[in-house]
Image (cartoon, grey):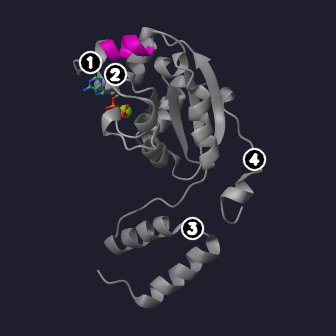
Amino acid sequence: MAVPTSFLSRAAAYAGRHLFRAGAFGAMATGAALGTTVACADATERSFIMLKPDAVQRGLVGEIIQRFEKRGYKLVGLKQVTPTLDMAKRHYHDLAARPFFPALTEFLSSGPVVAMVWEGEDVVKQGRAMIGATNPLASAPGTIRGDLAIVTGKNIIHGSDSVETAKAEIELWFDNKELNNYTANAATWIYEGK
Ligand code: DAT
Ligand code: MG
């Protein structure tokens, strides 16, 4: 379906004024043209990121946190916890039928992990991109797994794979009172129009 140029230019001017990212606007325009609903940029999006026992044992906690900080994301929840086997099973419930499930859940509950909630625009998808592929050997250099890990069973980090999953995982791992709502002054220098 064709979208009138006048609509697009008015929409582009609106987007410019309201400082949507070009990518988000493109998706919105496409969504409008296709008659579908596409979410707008949301700087309050949250992802559940967990540094697994291998990351803690290898002293990679600071390195990985720094990557999210440097990117511009905001830390709103952080704790170290040794998960019970039951907690590990609940976290990976969608993989319960897979043959590696027992080893995976035993591994996750074998020692302390660092559970975190990071906030910012597109953080779920960007977090996954920063993490890399499930198999570190298939992860590009520059990604966390591509730089810091070698095998799938010791791939050091978990990141939510969708906004919906993130909500469920944050609820599983954190009480509401453990999450911090605050204004990060750096946001002025990271986002437009803040
Ligand atoms: P990801 O962690 O990239 O989201 P996933 O959700 O498919 O990947 O799997 C969760 C974890 O399970 C993954 O980080 C490591 C482990 N895993 C996945 N596939 C596996 C496999 N084929 N063999 C062994 N472990 C696997
Ligand atoms: Mg996953």
Q: Is residue 22 left or right of residue 192?
A: left
> Of tags 1 and 3, which is closer to the observer?
1
Residue that numbered label 1 is attached to: 100
Query: What residue range appears in magenta?
Result: 103-108
CA–CA distance in space, label 4 to label 3: 20 Å
> Of tags 2 and 4, which is closer to the observer?
2
Whether residue 171 is visible to the viewer of this picture, yes or no, is yes
Look at label 2 and name its amino acid. Gly
Residue that numbered label 2 is attached to: 153
Locate the C terminus by quadrant.
bottom right
Secondary structure, mark 4, is loop
CA–CA distance in space, label 3 to label 2: 39 Å
Please give the name of the residue rendered at 40% of the width and 62% of the height, measured from the top-left corner.
37
- Label 3 CB sits under 8 Å from any ligand 1 atom: no
CA–CA distance in space, label 4 to label 1: 41 Å
Mark 3 surroundings within 10 Å by alpha-carbon count, few (fewer than 14), some (14 through 19), many (20 or more): some
Residue that numbered label 3 is attached to: 20
Disc on the earlier residue, 2 or 4: 2
- Label 2 CB sits under 8 Å from any ligand 1 atom: yes
> Of tags 4 and 1, which is closer to the observer?
1
Magenta stretch: includes residue 163: no
